[in-house]
Image (cartoon, rainbow, N blue to C red):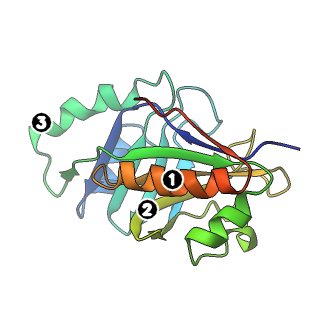
Amino acid sequence: MSALTLELREKRDRLGLKGPRAAEWLAAQGIALPMTPNTWTHSEGAVAAGAVLVARLGTAEFFLEDGAGGTTLGRIAPALDQSPPGVYPVLREDWAFLLGGDEVHDVLAQVCNVNFAALSLTSRPLIMTLMIGAAVLVVPQSAGDGGQSGSAKRHYRIWCDPTFGPYLGESLGEVVIECGGRYTGVSG
């Protein structure tokens, strides 16, 4: 049995890109890409501490987040200063949360209209939806394997625009607490 927890995640390097040559540019930088929109992968394949999460938001739009201790995005971001044709950076200053535990689907049912419990994790889905009125990106994963199997307990990585971060954290945190969980990583 795992305790229900919403965790405000530490700041990590993030990068957004879009444009007709964004996929080609990322591949040239050695980044593995998901093949279809609304899916994700890890650039190094395995779920290592430094692995980059790569989400394909559309045909030609990507969201990337370095793993804890990762240096990949810090290495490739300066190459964008050369303004490669057909590649347009998108500012990403998202707030990031991790939601998990035994009652996670009860919480999600109260704050969002997506039935997350019914999702197959083997296709590595990326969900763009509203949660308590705030636009979010959600990556469902199996705890411990980065989403490789559907059998382990699930957790959800959630990102939102920084202007909605405090609101989402407070509102979602209240629901988690009402369901017997805790909200961690909050400062001040």
Give the class, few, some or many, for how many residues have Cα within 10 Å of label 1's Cα (few <14, many ≥20).
many
* Residue bearing mark 3: 81
Q: Residue at x 70, y 46 (%)?
A: 181
Where is residue 137? Give x, y as percent. 46, 60
For the residue marked with disc 3, what is the amino acid? Asp
Above/below status of 186 relative to 106: above
- Determine the CA span between mark 3 and mark 2: 28 Å
* Label 2–label 1 contact, CB within 8 A: yes
Where is residue 43? Give x, y as percent. 51, 40
Q: Is residue 164 left or right of residue 50?
A: left
Q: Which of these two is toward me, 77 or 171? A: 171
* Residue bearing mark 2: 136
Where is residue 174? Give x, y as percent. 56, 54
Where is residue 120? Give x, y as percent. 73, 68
Mark before the other along the chain sequence, 3 or 2: 3
Q: Residue at x 47, y 68 (%)?
A: 132
Give the class, few, some or many, for how many residues have Cα within 10 Å of label 3's Cα (few <14, many ≥20).
few
* Residue bearing mark 1: 158
Judged from the image, the secondary structure of the residue bearing numbered disc 2 is: strand
Quadrant of the frame with the C terminus: top left
- Determine the CA span between mark 3 and mark 1: 29 Å
Nearest to viewer (mark 3 / mark 1): 1
For the residue marked with disc 1, what is the amino acid? Ile
Q: Residue at x 67, y 75 (%)?
A: 115
- Determine the CA span between mark 2 and mark 1: 7 Å
